[in-house]
Image (tube, rainbow, N blue to C red):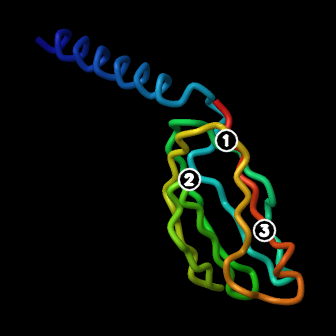
Amino acid sequence: MRATLTFVAALVLAAVSVTAMAANPDPKAKAVINVVGTADQKFDPAVVTMHVGKTQTLHLSSSGGVHGIASPELGIPATTIIPDKPVSVIVTPKKVGTYKLPCTIVCGANHADMLLTIEVKP
């Protein structure tokens, strides 16, 4: 009986592993992407890569100033990024492309150049 339970447990674990690999074909792809809005009005990193159909979380924080992003195409609602109050947004891209997300809140002298680029690949 114990051997049967061990065998069944091993089959379940194998099925879960295969399902996880199918859902995430690129084992190096990050499920969480950290992006920081900086005091000198930049996103760091300025470019991030996501994959079509892969759910990922953008973890947004600010090291200085209040910033914002939004992208209807990527399903990112208007999101405010406040120092000491990180916020996470779940994103599942539906279409390959390069998406440019400017800062949506006037945040300083370089605000017009503050841009987060999301490259969505197959």
Query: Disc 1 marks which residue?
Result: 120
Could you tell me which residue is drawn at 47 percent across and 29 percent down?
23
Q: Residue 33 sits in which quadrant? A: bottom right
Q: Residue 112 sits in which quadrant? A: bottom right
Residue 113 position (above or below residue 58): below
Q: How many marks?
A: 3
Q: Residue 36: where, in percent of width, then height?
A: 72, 70
Q: Secondary structure at mark 1?
A: strand
Query: In screen coordinates, is 110 left or right of 45?
Result: right
- Which label sits in the foreground, 3 or 2? 2
Marks 1 and 3, the one that precedes in the sequence:
3
Residue 115 position (above or below residue 13): below
Which quadrant is home to the N terminus? top left
Residue type at mark 1: give it. Val
Q: Which mark is residue 74?
A: 2
Q: Secondary structure at mark 3?
A: strand
Which quadrant is home to the C terminus? top right
Mark 1: give few (<14), some (14-19) or many (20+) Cα within 10 Å.
Answer: many
Residue type at mark 3: give it. Phe
Residue type at mark 2: give it. Leu
Query: In screen coordinates, is 56 left or right of 106?
Result: left
Query: Disc 3 marks which residue?
Result: 43
